[in-house]
Structure formats: structure tokens, C-alpha cells
Image (cartoon, grey):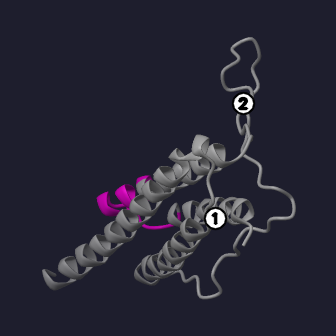
Amino acid sequence: MNTSRELKQLRADLDLLIVLAKQLTPSREVSLAFTKLQEGKMHVGNTIFETEDYKVYVNSNDPSNKIIDAYHVDSEIIAMQTPNDWSPDHVERVKILRRELSAMLVRIKSIGDELTLLPSQLFARDFLLTSYIKMRECQNWFGMELARIRESSITK
């Protein structure tokens, strides 16, 4: 397994989940899940940064220019496609996102098992674990969204 490539693919796939989550009907639970997705992506990025001599945002600390760097996935890495069963129904979308997160959690465990680190890269495993926790929390918030919908339909 090429862990560097897997990490970059995971980050690209999280980008897609963030785009899909923006299409959900707004609620407190969806907003919190969205934040956890962003945090998970951030920590995958930190894992990449710690495992490679890789500078993502080279202009971010240089106030002498107006350049705002964008994150670019390597051209050979193809981002996950929108799920074939993506539905206009909010409940179905939440369930699809929970399913996709379950698959990502398995992938993170696999990457963690394969991650070989130098002593100078030990924080990488911590960042990967934090990403796992954030995505698990996201999945839980989507579960709370389903509970909120169920409760609101019962009280009607």
C-alpha cells in the first residue's frame, strides 16, 4: 500500500463529502457534522504534512503577496465520485453520508496499520487518529440528525 497516495486520496474523498454535506437541509446536527468533516480533512492534511517534505500552502505565511494557495490533489489521484444512489431525499442523503463515512473509517484504520514512521514523524499517527475521531463524531452527528427527523415526525 502506498500510504502517501492513500492519504491524499482520502483527503480528496473528504472534499467530496464536504461538498455533498453542503447539499443537506440545514440543522444544528448537520452543521456540527459538517464541522467534523472539515476537522477530519484538516487532520488528514496534517498527517500528510508530517509524513512528507510537503508544503501545501507555501504562500500562507508571506504577507508580501496576495496569493491564496489552494490545495491540489496530485493529478494521478482521482477523487471519489458522487455515490450512484445520491438522492434528493434528505434522509437518504444522510444515510448515504453515514455509509461513506463507515467506509472511510475502515480505510483510516488500514492506513494507520501500514504507516511506517521515522522518529521525526511521530505526530503523524496522532493526527491520523484525530482524523478518525472527527469522522466518527461526524457519523454520530448524522445519526443525531436522523433521530431529530424521527422525533419531529412523531410529534406531528
Residue 90's spot in the image, x, y percent? 43, 77
Residue 27's spot in the image, x, y percent? 33, 61
Left of 93 or right of it: where is 28?
left
Q: Nearer the viewer, residue 151 or 105?
A: 105
Residue occupying image coordinates x 35% and y 56%: 32
Q: Up-down: is 72 above or below 53?
A: below
Residue holding disc 1:
10
Residue holding disc 2:
68
Residue occupying image coordinates x 69% and y 14%: 63
Nearer the viewer's eye, disc 2 or disc 1? 1
Question: Label 1 amino acid?
Answer: Leu
Residue 38 in view of the camera:
no
Left of 124 or right of it: where is 28?
left
Residue 25's spot in the image, x, y percent? 42, 66
Residue 121's spot in the image, x, y percent? 59, 45
Q: In which quarter of the image is the N terminus?
A: bottom right
Q: Few, some or many C-alpha atoms within 10 Å of disc 1 (few <14, some 14-19, many ≥20)?
A: many
In the rendered structure, which segment of residues is drawn in magenta? Answer: 23-35
Most extreme residue toward the left is 155
Question: Label 2 amino acid?
Answer: Ile
Q: Do the residues labelled 2 and 1 touch (CB within 8 Å)?
A: no
Does the segment drawn in magenta span residue 93? no
Residue occupying image coordinates x 35% and y 63%: 137
Q: Few, some or many C-alpha atoms within 10 Å of disc 2 (few <14, some 14-19, many ≥20)?
A: few
Whichever of callouts 2 and 1 sits on the residue coming sooner in the sequence is 1
Residue occupying image coordinates x 55% and y 60%: 18
Identify the image quadrant of residue 134.
bottom left
Label 1, secondary structure: give it.
Answer: helix
Does the segment drawn in magenta span residue 32? yes
Q: In which quarter of the image is the C terminus?
A: bottom left
Most extreme residue toward the front is 119
State the count of labels. Answer: 2
